[in-house]
Image: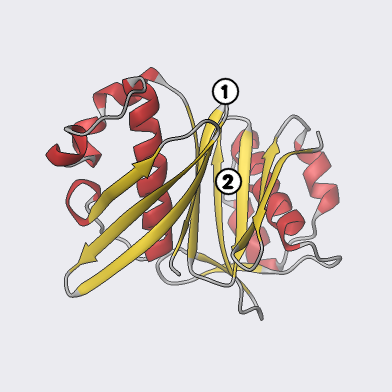
Amino acid sequence: MPVFQSLSEISLFNAIVYQVTEPLDFFRDKIELSDSEMSYFSAKRHPERQKESYAVRYALHLALNKQNRVVLETDLYGKPYLVGSESFISLSHTSRYVAAVVSPYPCGIDIQRFDTKILNLGAKFLAEKELGDIPPVSMVSFLTHCWAIKEAAYKTFGKKGLEFNKEIEIQEIDFREGSWESKVRVQKNDEDFKYQVKGWTSEAFVLAICLEI
């Protein structure tokens, strides 16, 4: 299927959302993997997990808008980066959709499908004051947006061990039709970061792109 959605803001980021409807072989034919990437894929035995991993790399290739594919590696924290490039990237996937973002700034992207299961998780990733200021939307929608925002912020921070309900604070969400913005603060030990989030909401998913600007 063609790209589901292409999103960009000049000088800030370029992002691709791709709806995955093709078989695994489609993506295998589209991108050539490095030896280290092949080792990563060989460890994924489930065909659907393999297809998601190939598809998100294909989305990244499209977001980069380059003829030749750039090799992808991960750092010691598991954060992906492009070999030989100064651009920052982030990847995400959910059921039948993958997303990738490229930016000159540290960034994180997260895509989430709406699911009522999230109703049982809110208190685990939101602080009491965040739960006490719910905008006029359904609880499923509110929690899905908050989860996407915090996941994107976590990826932007780029290190493991963040407590979502204590060390990632959503300071503001400006809900609007289709697109929205948010501000997030991450505090870990002596580190203190403030991030901007650009978001989009469709009938199928919530997409959050977090930037350290």
Q: Nearer the viewer, residue 143 or 175?
A: 175
Residue 176 versus residue 16 in the image, above or below: above
Identify the residue at image location x=40%, y=36%: 145
Number of labelled discs?
2
Quadrant of image for the C terminus: bottom left
Secondary structure of the residue carrying tag 2 is loop
Identify the residue at image location x=69%, y=67%: 35
Q: Please give the residue where the numbered disc 2 appears in the rendered image.
A: 44
Quadrant of image for the N terminus: top right
Secondary structure of the residue carrying tag 1 is loop
Tell me which amino acid carries mark 1. Answer: Glu
Tell me which amino acid carries mark 2. Answer: Lys
Task: Name the mark on residue 203.
Answer: 1
User: Which mark is first along the chain, 2 or 1?
Assistant: 2
Q: How is the image coloured?
A: secondary structure
Asked if residue 7 lies left or right of residue 212, the reply is right
Mark closer to the observer (1, 2): 1
Identify the residue at image location x=42%, y=71%: 76
